[in-house]
Image: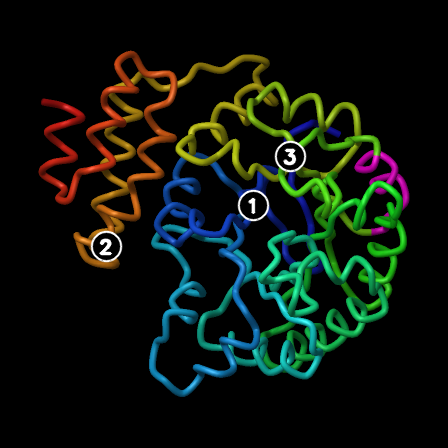
Amino acid sequence: MALYHPVKIGALEIPGNLFLAPVAGYTDRVFRSVCAEWGADFSFTELVSAEALVRTANNGLSKTERLLVRGDGETRYAVQLFGSDPAVVARAASLLEGFSPDALDLNSGCPVPKVIKTGSGAALIREPARLAALVSAAVKIAETRLGGIPVTVKIRSGWDSGSINYRETARAAVEAGASLVSLHARTRAQGYSGKSDWSHIADLASRLAVPLIGSGDLYTPEDALRMLNETGCAGVMFARGALGNPFIFSATKSLLTNGSYTWPDNQLRLKTALRQLELLAADTGESFACREMRKQFCAYTKGISGGRGMRDRLVHAQTIAEYREILFG
């Protein structure tokens, strides 16, 4: 099979195998749309609290619900929920009916303490049976209320180096009805530090009857090529490697299909960043967008000549006009 190929998730067929990971504080609907324009085949919302979604369900379009909205031009996406109570996850899943996601993803990999302490995220690695109950509850709602969309799961290798149990976790999820598993090949104890162990991805890819998407240390098109070759996973999921760099999707597709790629020039990089800011301002208001995009511009300007001085000014910009002046003079 070609390295760049479709991925079938239950009845849903994705035209390619380059995914954008859910990254809290970054993968809002505007950034997902920009990534889609640059070749991302599938994306996930930021993680959404099932409990918060249920609690604010009757309050109009709440802050939590805004995380669920499909991006303009985003043809395929999944909503990612986190929770620890199957009944609450089921209720939250039922509330997705008006948003029409293409899949529902359950997070069992987030290492952030405030998520862990609720028994959610990576805490579920220690309780595969609970994860299975969550998947089963979500699948039932997906089949009865959401048009039969697939349920997927994101996991980590284990809680720590002494409890590597991705096989058991993935098996529990799939037996409960998950149609795809994505594996971030780090432990909860590692967080986002250290090195991911791609041998875990290779091992799990050889065992699962559903597609496995690999994640961890994907920063360049060459990294994606190597992961696909070394592990046999069905696709790759870019996380930090895509922040401020939506171009990684088109570059990776070119490498996988043509054997080479070129990065956009600096002018196009900055124009894309400014366009993202303008789209976000139209979505959320200029003041909020200008504050929120500072971190994105820090990523967009990495490697650009004079980027450091530019970043020193950008972090104080308060209007789109100020951003434009700093970027283009």
**Which sits in the foreground, 83 or 205?**
83
Measure the C-alpha gap from mark 3 to mark 2: 30 Å
> Of callouts 3 and 2, which one flags the residue occurring earlier in the amino acid sequence?
3
Measure the C-alpha gap from mark 1 to mark 3: 17 Å
Answer left or right for 206 relative to 285: right
Packing grade of label 2 (10 A; few <14, some 14-19, many >=20) is some
Q: Quadrant of residue 88?
A: bottom right
Task: From the image, give the main secondary structure of the stretch colored magenta.
Answer: helix
Residue 174 on image: x %, y %: 82, 60
Going by the numbered disc 2, the residue's amino acid type is: Phe
Q: Secondary structure at mark 2?
A: helix
- The answer to the question of whether label 1 and label 2 lie on touching residues, with beta carbons closer than 8 A, is no
Looking at the image, residue 38 lies above or below residue 48: above
Residue in the image at 65% along x and 82% along y: 144
Residue 129 on image: x %, y %: 85, 69
The residue identified by callout 1 is 21
Q: Which mark is residue 288?
A: 2
* Quarter the N terminus occupies: top right
**Which sits in the foreground, 128 or 146?**
128
Measure the C-alpha gap from mark 1 to mark 2: 23 Å
Dot in front, 1 or 2: 2
**Which sits in the foreground, 293 or 308?**
308
Q: Please report the bounds of the magenta region as a residue range.
A: 200-209
> Of callouts 1 and 2, which one flags the residue occurring earlier in the amino acid sequence?
1
Dot in front, 1 or 3: 3
Q: How is the image coloured?
A: rainbow
Residue 201 on image: x %, y %: 79, 37
Q: Secondary structure at mark 3?
A: loop
Residue in the image at 84% along x and 56% along y: 169
Q: Quadrant of residue 315?
A: top left
The residue identified by callout 3 is 193
* Quarter the C terminus occupies: top left
